[in-house]
Amino acid sequence: MQITTVKELSEFLKIKEKTIYQWAESGKIPCFKFNGALRFDLNDIKTWMESCKKVPFESYNQLAQTAGVRSPRKGVEN
């Protein structure tokens, strides 16, 4: 368990401290209070970050999309 503060987490995530407080208040980010101070477990934060990732569609592959499609040659009509 690696505990971090709001300030340290804001630097880690590159977001404002105010945003972290808002997320914590609304339950959007895993946190706990220790003696009245808001704290975060970095392992929980990393797991939370992974759950926030958007995975691209399986069919999204630019190379596969363009490999089967030929562009018409100049001066040649289809």
Image: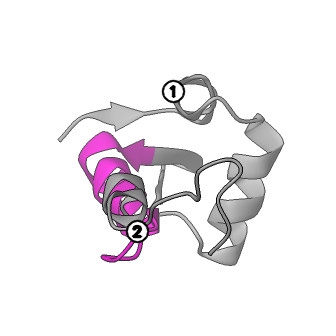
Label 2: which secondary element: loop
Which mark is nearer the camera, 1 or 2?
2
Q: Which numbered marker is on residue 45?
A: none
Q: Please state if 17 lies on the left or on the right of 59 as rendered.
A: right
- Seen from the viewer's position, the closer of residues 68 and 20 is 68
Figure colour scheme: one colour
Residue 3 % position (x, y): 33, 36
Residue 67 location (% of width, % of height): 33, 58
Mark 1 residue element: helix
Q: Is residue 65 rendered magenta in the image?
A: no
Q: Residue at x 63, y 32 (%)?
A: 10
Answer few, some or many: residues within 10 Å of disc 2's Cα (few below 14, many 20 plus, some between 14 and 19).
few
Q: Position of residue 63 (x, y in %)?
A: 34, 52
Task: Please tell me which residue lies in front, 70 or 34.
Answer: 70
Q: Which label belongs to residue 60?
A: 2
Residue at x 78%, y 35% (from the top left corner): 16
Residue occupied by mark 1: 12
Q: Amino acid at mark 2?
A: Tyr
Q: Does 50 lie within the magenta span?
A: yes
User: What is the span of residues highlighted in magenta in the rendered image?
Assistant: 40-60
Q: Quadrant of residue 44?
A: bottom left
Inter-mark Cα distance, 1 to 2: 30 Å
What's the residue type where badge 1 is placed? Phe
